[in-house]
Amino acid sequence: MSVDKEERQRHLPAGRKAQLAAYVAEAGQVTVGELADRFGVSIDTVRRDLDHLSAEGVLVRTYGGAVSLATISRTDRAVDQRLSLQEQEKEKIAALAAALVQDGSTIMINGGTTTLALARELSRHRDLTVATNNLLVPGVLAPSAIRDIYIFGGAVRSSTLATIGPVSFRVHGGAELDISCDLALIGVGAVSEEAGYTTSNLAEAAMMKEMISRAARVAILADSSKFGRRLFAQVSDLSSADYLITDSTPPPGLRNALAASNVELITPAA
């Protein structure tokens, strides 16, 4: 039932945002136009409200609208759906993460759409060796940037188009090669001061943990919608990373915990 015009005009911004957040939580997924009509405000006003609520971790901003956190956490999103979530935030994170990658280095990249955005940002790099379980990464890497690409074997998760298995390669005869990398770039599902870095799938968590253990430096990639949440499986505690790359400053508690764990916070310049 829509709010009548006189009632709309009496709404203070804080009250409107609270009602907007409640409506998104109930509907699950909404468009900017739908919210503008319902609350009798401009498209620009709705966009600002959604941006604020997204920064506060109340909902997840998408291209043209928003979805509730409950909708996101119910199940792993198929890749084609998740590509549109937090799209601008992922692009900012990807650009910052690419700046950490040195020409001629060896990097590991895990599955996910944030790391896929990172792979696209590596076009100006040269002579990289890339090892990944993300089946979409080879298709977006610029050939001019790459010396070698390796895909970790294992079962394929259709929802993420990533392999699940050991972080290893074998030579003929079955002997396992010892591998390591200069930098692991790991996208995670949630970050909290209590649980560290977590994800929704146990096998993925084990694989990400092993990538971290084989890296000289570790960068965790997570947009601000992941702050203060815990998912099913822990990847590692906060101190296992050298960097947390994100789109906005975390809440004070998490920010202090990262500093105490000697994790460098990397965010876009104001």
Image (tube, rainbow, N blue to C red):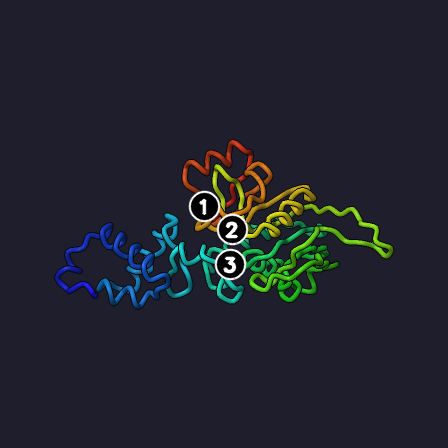
Q: Earlier in the sequence, mark 2 or mark 3?
A: 3
Q: CA distance from mark 2 to mark 3?
A: 10 Å
The one of 72 and 86 positioned closer to us in this rendering: 72
| Disc 3 element | loop
Q: Distance of mark 1 from mark 2, alpha carbons?
A: 9 Å
The amino acid type found where label 3 is placed reads Asp
Residue found at the very far right of the displayed protein: 173
Q: Answer above or below: position of 254 versus 142.
A: above
Q: Is residue 267 visible?
A: yes
Looking at the image, which is closer to me, 72 or 84?
Answer: 72
N-terminal of the two: label 1 or label 2?
2
Residue 265 percent across, percent down from the top left: 51, 41
> What residue does disc 1 label?
229
Badge 1 marks a residue whose secondary structure is loop
- Density class for disc 3 (Cα within 10 Å; few <14, some 14-19, many ≥20) is some
Q: Which mark is residue 189?
A: 2
Q: Do residues under tags 1 and 2 come within 8 Å of each other at their CB atoms?
A: yes
Residue 192 in picture, x, y percent from top left:
48, 41
Between marks 1 and 3 in the image, the one whose residue lies nearer the viewer = 3
Q: Left or right of 225: which side holds 242?
A: right
Picture residue at 70% right of the left edge, 44% below the top: 214
Q: Position of residue 44 (x, y in %)?
A: 30, 62
The quadrant of the image that shows the N terminus is bottom left
- Label 1, label 3: how many angstroms apart (C-alpha)? 15 Å
Q: Is residue 70 left or right of residue 147?
A: left
Q: Earlier in the sequence, mark 1 or mark 3?
A: 3
Query: Image quarter for residue 197?
Result: top right
Tag on residue 76? 3
